[in-house]
């Protein structure tokens, strides 16, 4: 089990190292939108201490720092050095001196017991091999009455399942990394509530929100799919078959393109906030 966890974490680190230069820079606002909404629901107040695990390029980290203000303390951790550099540079550019960012494992939150007022995890928990252990660790480092706030994906429409099968069906068996070993735990709203309550959290609240994310073209959307974790799946397609994958993607998305040549991608996000 430990070896499997190490392999998974290395795969996640490698995937986001590929994506780091273009992460959240392609197409319409995406992770930034969801990160800011997560911070709103977490109810971060001036002077609070906030830990953002798997902070990426700062989608939740930066608005959390704005909410905590100069008197607060905000720490972002991420496995991927390229993401840490992105978040650190963004915080510097915005003058957020209350922000620290470091390379660390989201399953091993820093700090002694009762350190943090809030722990954030923006689209992170399903990447963790031991999500239950992580939830226990977050509860331990949260202050009494502190809150864990995290986001996960809601249900995907069936037509988009068809699109992704068309593209990534070209990956040879066994070649794709397992980036989301805990993904099945986040498949339904009720399952997520059961998960966090089983690990001692109370007052669990959920918001499931839908977004119409519109890409200017199929090409822009395809570029977006290589700007986050799915970059690893593209790399798993043999190089001589990637043009075929693009062609299949264009064919599969043709019925979904609007009259202006744009590609609307309905996206559902589940936000969960629970008290330690």
Image: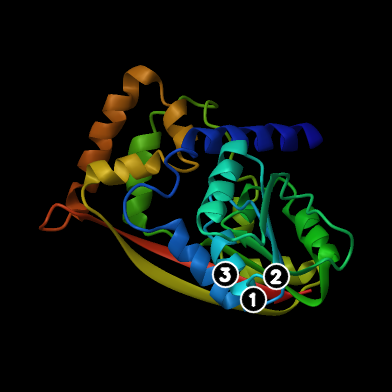
Graded by Cα atoms within 10 Å as few (under 14), some (14 to 19) or many (20 or more), the crowding at tag 2 reads many
The mark closer to the camera, 3 or 1, is 3
Which corner quadrant of the image does residue 5 belong to? top right
Tag 2, which secondary structure?
loop
The mark closer to the camera, 2 or 1, is 2
Comparing 71 with 244, the one in front is 71
Question: Which mark is on residue 21?
Answer: none
Q: Which residue lies furthest to the bottom in this view?
A: 203
Answer left or right for 174 relative to 49.
Answer: left
In this picture, is 50 found above or below 19? below
Question: Which mark is on residue 72?
Answer: 2
Tag 1, which secondary structure?
loop
Answer left or right for 183 relative to 204.
Answer: left
Label 3 vs label 2: CA separation?
Answer: 9 Å
Comparing 45 with 274, the one in front is 45
Question: Which mark is on residue 66?
Answer: 3
Classify the position of the N terminus by image quarter. Answer: top right
Q: Closer to the N terminus: mark 2 or mark 1?
A: 1
> In this figure, what is the number of numbered marks?
3
Residue 219, given in percent of the width and then of the height, sits at: 24, 41
Q: Closer to the N terminus: mark 3 or mark 1?
A: 1
Tag 2 near tag 1, CB within 8 Å: yes
In this picture, is 63 found above or below 100? below
Graded by Cα atoms within 10 Å as few (under 14), some (14 to 19) or many (20 or more), the crowding at tag 1 reads many
Residue at the image point whose x is 61% and y is 71% from the top: 272
């Amino acid at each position: 089990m430990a070896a499997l966890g190490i392999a998974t974490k290395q795969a996640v680190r490698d995937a986001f190292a590929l994506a780091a230069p273009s992460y959240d820079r392609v197409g319409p606002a995406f992770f930034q939108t969801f990160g800011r909404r997560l911070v709103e629901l977490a109810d971060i107040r001036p002077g609070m201490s906030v830990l953002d695990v798997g902070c990426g390029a700062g989608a939740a980290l930066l608005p959390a720092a704005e909410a905590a203000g100069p008197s607060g303390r905000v720490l972002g951790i991420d496995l991927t050095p390229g993401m840490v550099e992105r978040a650190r540079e963004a915080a510097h550019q915005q003058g957020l001196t209350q922000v620290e960012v470091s390379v660390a494992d989201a399953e091993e939150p820093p700090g002694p017991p009762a350190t943090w007022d809030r722990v954030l995890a923006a689209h992170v928990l399903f990447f963790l091999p031991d999500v239950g252990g992580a939830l226990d660790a977050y509860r331990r480092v949260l202050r009494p009455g502190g809150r864990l706030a995290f986001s996960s994906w809601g249900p995907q429409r069936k037509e988009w399942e068809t699109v992704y099968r068309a593209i990534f069906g070209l990956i040879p068996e066994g070649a794709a990394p397992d980036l989301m070993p805990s993904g099945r735990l986040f498949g339904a709203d009720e399952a997520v509530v059961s998960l966090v309550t089983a690990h001692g959290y109370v007052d669990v609240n959920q918001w499931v929100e839908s977004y119409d994310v519109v890409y200017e073209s199929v090409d822009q959307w395809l570029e977006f799919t290589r700007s986050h974790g799915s970059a690893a799946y593209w790399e798993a397609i043999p190089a001589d078959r990637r043009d075929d994958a693009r062609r299949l993607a264009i064919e599969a998305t043709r019925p979904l393109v609007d009259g202006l040549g744009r590609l609307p991608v309905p996206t559902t996000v589940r936000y969960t906030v629970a008290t330690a």
